Amino acid sequence: MAQRTTLALHWKILIGLVLGLIVGVVINVGWSSKTWEAIGVDAPSAFMTGGGEQVNEDAGVVAYGVRFVAHLNQFVGDLFIRALRFIAVPLVLFSLIVGASSLNDLKKLSRIGGKTIVIYLCTTALAVSVGLVLVNTIKPGGYISEKTRDKLVEMHASEAASKLASAQTNRATVENLTVWDRLVDLVPRNPAAALANTQMLQIVVTALIIGIGLTLIRETKAAPIIGFCDGMTDLVIKLVNVGMKAAPVAVFALIVKVVAVMGLDVLGALVVYSLTVVAGLMIMIFGVYPLILKVMTPYGYRRFFRGVAPAQLLAFSSSSSAATLPVTMECAEQRLGVSEEVSAFVLPLGATINMDGTALYQGVAAVFIAQMFGIDLTAFDQLAIIMTATLASIGTAAVPSAGLIMLVIVLEQVGMGEQIGPGIAILFGVDRLLDMCRTTCNVTGDLMVATVVASTENELMDEAQVQAAAKRREEVGLDENPHE
């Protein structure tokens, strides 16, 4: 009897993504105010929020069916992202405790940490530089007429005001913190609060402290705690594998919503700007990262991208490095062969401080806004953008559209106070689409750095070992540690 072949998960996710794009475009193009009128809805916004029964008395079965499908679609996407966020914190906590406690060598831990931070900072600064070269060469701001600019500002003025309010609060907090305050803030006052609020850097520090502490007490006392954390890590990874079966459907739901809501007229007006950002991200993903891997690891181009594909596709759909983190860690350990002790440290840290795509976007956006308003930025101003975007990206939360808030700090650094509000409003229309692309870049960068660090520490399995471990897991039906 012939063995049935199943389609790989990343292909299923890709199919869901493509179908979502198609359905989203069809809805965006084909659904208009006349369509609402035809099904008896004269106040679509009120009706879709569930409070429109009184103002849409003529709405029939079709209208309520449309609302149900839309709400169901949003429910599926939101539930999947919520489940991933639920898994991310315990995965980081328990796996990092096990990883730190298994090192038994504080020098090795500090060496891994030092390599990780230096590489992250260097790639972030490089990403901003790539973005600045492209935006100064292409000059996308020159393609926006004054009339189009004013129309875009008017369309998204309310959303921009909300983002600016959040940015002002964030900026006030950042400005009042010294370097020493930021270092102190790495240690949580209350570990439970850090877990509840998903303060990833504080969770990483908490796990490291516990892991190091376990190496300092008697092995007989440490063994039960390490065993519990190891078992919890296996449990969470099992939940990730189970949850990923729903990923193709969830990706479809997430993409449909984004594309259906985003107006194609806005995308058309900002197409040159959008393509400039995407070109920079593609250079990082398909040029810079593979080049670094080629120089520093035995990894080939195809093998790396085959291994990271599920994480990239989920990052694109969710626009959140934090939500993608469980899948990112699974890809690193089970598909790339990175040891658990390296991935458990490098990847949670990367989801917090490594924002190459966000930094590149901030550099391009700042110069684009300056070009659009006829402001000349000197070489010193652009150097300031590199430095500010690199540092601001470290403080950017790993959640959708956070980069738009941190852009305010970059714009203020180069003296564009009056242009901040209109500039944010103009970018808002395409921000979600670009957020999806830059999150993909962020996650790819995290996996590249994890692979490089693992290779330099001799903690990287070759392709034959990875395939053998995968076959062993498939045979026993368990998500055993591939490094045992």
Image (cartoon, grey):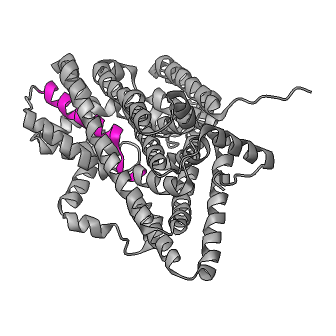
Percent position of residue 40, x then y:
54, 26
Q: Is residue 164 left or right of residue 268?
A: left
Q: Nearer the viewer, residue 70 or 137?
A: 137
Quadrant housing the N terminus: top right
Instruction: Place residue 249 in its image quadrant.
Output: top right
Q: Nearer the viewer, residue 381 or 368?
A: 381
Front one among 371 and 145: 371
- The answer to whether 173 is drawn above or below residue 473 in the figure is below
Q: Who's the residue at 52% across and 31% down the image?
A: 305
The answer to whether residue 171 is left or right of residue 114 is left
Residue 240 appears in view: yes
Q: Report the residue at 40% width, 43% height from top.
A: 400
Magenta stretch secondary structure, dominant: helix
Q: Is residue 224 above or below residue 459?
A: below
Q: Which of the pair 88/29 is nearer the observer?
A: 88
Can you give x and y, in whole percent of width and height, for residue 469 in the image? 69, 46
Q: Quadrant of residue 421?
A: top left
Q: Is residue 158 visible?
A: no
Looking at the rendering, the stretch of residues picked out in magenta corresponds to 351-373
Q: Is residue 377 left or right of residue 41?
A: left
Residue 277 image point, x, y percent: 31, 28
Which x, y percent locates residue 178?
A: 18, 64
Q: Residue at x 34, y 66 (%)?
A: 186
Q: Quick check: is 368 in the magenta stretch?
A: yes
Quadrant that contains the C terminus: bottom right
Residue 398 falls inside the magenta stretch = no
